[in-house]
Structure formats: C-alpha cells, structure tokens
Amino acid sequence: MIEVKNLTKKFGSHLSLDSVSCTFDIGESIALMGANGAGKTTLIRSILGYYHPDGGEVLINGQNPIKERTNVLKDISFVPQLPPPIKLSIEELMHYISVSADVDKELIKHYANEMKLDINENMSKSFFKLSGGMKQKLLIAISLAKKSNIIIYDEPTANLDPKARDDFYRLLEQNEEPKTLLFVTHRLEEVKELVNRQIYMDMGKIFSDEVF
Amino acid sequence: MKNLSLIAYLDLKESIRAKWFIVYSLVFGGLIALFFIAGVTESQVMGFSGLSRLLLMYIQITIVILPIFILITTVRSISGDRDNHILEYMLSFPISLKHYYWGKIIGRFITVYLPVLFAMVIAIIFGAIKGAAIPWSIFFLYTGLLFSLSSTFLGIAFFISSFVKSSEVALGIAFFIWIFLLAFIDIALISLMLQQRMNEGVILFIALINPMELFRVAAISLFDPELTVMGPVAFYILDLMSQGIFVLVAIGYPLLLGLMFATFGFVIFKKKDLV
C-alpha cells in the first residue's frame, strides 16, 4: 500500500508537487496521466525515495522510502521510460539484481523468453548495446521476476512493437498475485484494459481521480 | 557487506573494460618502458643512478599526471550516472546508499591504483633481470605515497561528483583543483615569497597542506634526507619534525584528507535528492 500525504516538492522556485495526497491499495491498477511537467515523474521518484520532500510524506506499507530504503525497495519494481545506458553486460546486470534483490536469474530468463527476447545469446553483450526494444523487454522481464507487490511502469511500451506490447499485457494479466500497478502514461487507450483507476495530474496537483 | 563487494566488483569490471583504463595503464606502463629504452638506469644525475633514478623520474612525472587522471576519470562516476539516468534505475533495487557509494569508491580505487603500482613492479622485475640493485626502501616509500595520493584525489573526485548535477561542471571543477594545487607547488609560492607579502611560516604551511607538495618533498627525502636540494625550506621542515615523522605525515595526511573528502561526499550524496 502506498500512502502519499500532503506531499510537496519544490525545485528552486518551481513547485513540482503541491500538497498531493492519495492512496494506492493492493489490487489497484492505476493510470497516472498528465501533461509534461504535471508532476508525474516527481511523484514516482518520491515514492521510490529519490527525492527529499519539502512537505508531507510518503509511506510504503507504513515505511518511509528514504529512511527504510532497502526494506521498501524489496517490494517495488520499477521500469523507467527510457532504458538507461548501463555499461554492464547482461550477465553482470542480472548478477547485480540477483544479489541485491534476491531475484532468481532463471525467472528473469523465463520472462525474457515470454517477451520473445533470447537472453542466452546476448549474456556477454553490454546492456547499452542492445536495441531499444530489447532493453525495454529485459527491464520488463526483470520487473516481473522480482515478484514485487508494487510495480511502477513509466511509459513501459514506448519502445515496444505491437507484438511485444501484446506479450507484455498478456504477462501482466497472467499475474496471479494481487499487486499495486502504477502506469505513467500519455495514452490511456494502451493500458485501458489493465487499469481500474485513472488519475490525472496538472500543475503539481491531482486534477481528477476516477475509479472504474 | 555482500552488496558493498558487489558494487566494488561490478565497478571494477566496468572500469577495466573502459577505454580510459587502457590509456591510463598504457601511460604508466609506457613511462617505465620508455625510461628503460632511453637508458635512464645507466645514467647518473645529481648522484642518482640505476633503478633509484628511474623511480625518481617516474614519481616526478606521476605527481603531475596521476591527480588529473584520477580526477577526470572519477569525477563523473556518480554525476555521470545521475546525468544519464543510470542511478535512477540501479538505485531502484534494495541497495543501501552507503554500500553503493563506498562500493564505487573501493572499485575505483583498485582501478586507479593498480596500474601505477604494477608499472613500478614491472620496473623492479626488469631492473632485477638486468642485474641492477633494487632500492626496496624507495619502492616501499613510493608504494605508500602513491596509495595516499590516489586516496586524496579519489576522495576529492567523489566529493565533487556527489554535489555536481552535470558531469561537464564536475570536469571543470576537477581541472581547476588540479591546476590550483599544481600552481601552489612552485609558481604561486615562489611569487608569494618573492613579493615577501607573507611570512615564511605561512608559506611553508600552505606548501605542506598541499598533498602534491607533500608527496614531492617526501619522494626526494629518501635520496636526500637533509633535503638539501630544496634549499632553505628544508630547514623549516626538518626543524619541525624528523625525516621519519615527515614521511609518516606525508603518507598519513593525504590519506586522511581523501577519507575526509569522501565522507563529506557521502553525507551530501545521502542528504541530497538522488536524481
């Protein structure tokens, strides 16, 4: 469960989040929408404990993501909008994830396979040398293999072709455990089948919050 | 602890594959090779000959290039990862900031220190094959001095990296620090003395808090325990402490300085927004 209470975040004189309050429960699947600069990314990064708030607080299962960082992040999977240019090989990246987050490497391979990504052929290749779509598929596979209660996807299908998008949606629907799924997206139609709540942000505030 | 060694190990592996590391290793290895080819071990200048002379030349060049190499290659370590969103992804896994930061420092320290050390080891091995007398005391002194000098600049680089948002700015600051410390070895100090605007004690103090100056003086102290080549400055140093204590200070102080800067860097890294 994610609780956001009166969260305020400023960057210099710019108010990025203006006393935002919301709660995301287990079993909820939320589309977080809004124009560029609306505060979506700031909210996501605050949930992940990257930002020190100027006011208010975020609690993940009752814990502060800055103070209890390692405990909180055990329960969160995150896929960024643009895969970062990580110079580690896929093997090394998987080793990092497997040791730090106790993720089964075979499970990553399984989900990668489900996403039609042949990892075994590319194990020694640097992550940043993969194509945009391959990187995104691997990050999605990692997010699913981590078996977290909370999964945050920031425009997850931006680099995926239609077939890969279908695979991604299929895997999410197959997911047996109840979770909190948070999609940051500009296109509701892409995740409409998956979400049961839609939040629209503007100027650092929640403008509308609808449950379907 | 497993996460600390994991970060150090992965940073080490990533660095070893980087082009800068190949250039870095070639520069220091190449220097030693060049000295042997140029016949430095056969020449004699100011009473220094053989491997001692070679190591002295090596250390004199190292004092100029090692700091800038360490600063340039390390200063972008965290700021670069922040710039290109690597930090955002890598820190979304349950790794403590303490393990991430210090693991990066340990990995990077091994990367920058080993090539410099290996170059000296190669010189010793090659010198021994050629039948030269091995100056062990100089070798161990230089090993210690290089260790502490590497720590200083690594600490400074991580300190800069922790608060600078853009890696371009980080590079600029690093370059300024290098020029500033280099200038205060000779140029600025000599001009200050010539103008006699400050008393000698202050000038000596400025000189001794500069880790590069301390490194240089300690490097020649084994050849010249009276520090006669340094002129009157030597009297101040040797009046202040014995040669043995001076060598210990020359190793201990930069080490402490590096640790202090690295710790400041960690505090900033922890307190600031991560991305």
Image: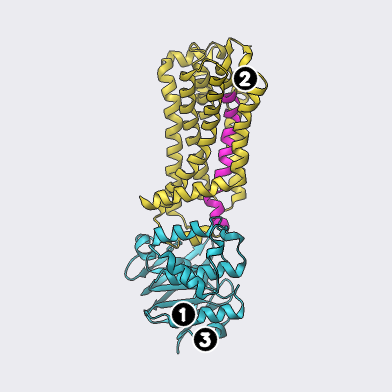
The letter of the cyan chain is A
Q: Nearer the viewer, mark 1 or mark 2?
A: 1
Residue that mark 2 sits on: B195
C-alpha distance separating marks 1 and 2: 76 Å
Q: Chain of mark 3?
A: A
The residue under the point 34% across, 61% down is: A68
* First to last magenta residue range: B58-84
Callout 3 environment at 10 Å: few (<14), some (14 to 19), or many (20+)? some
Q: Picture quarter containing residue A72?
A: bottom left
C-alpha distance separating marks 3 and 2: 77 Å
Give residue A22's position: percent from left, percent from top. Answer: 41, 77
Q: Chain of mark 2?
A: B
Residue type at mark 1 is: Leu
Q: Are marks 3 and 2 on the same chain?
A: no
User: Is residue B141 or residue B211 the one in the foreground?
Assistant: B141
Disc marking residue A172: 1
The answer to whether the residue labelled 3 contacts the one labelled 2, judged by CB atoms less than 8 Å apart, is no
Quadrant position of the N terminus of chain A in the picture = bottom left
Residue A163 vs B81, above or below: the answer is below
Element assignment for label 1: helix
Q: Are marks 1 and 3 on the same chain?
A: yes
Residue that mark 3 sits on: A192
Give residue A156's position: percent from left, percent from top. Answer: 54, 74
- Tell me if residue B252 can be seen: yes
Q: Chain of mark 1?
A: A
Residue B124 is covered by the magenta coloring: no
Quadrant position of the C terminus of chain A in the picture = bottom left
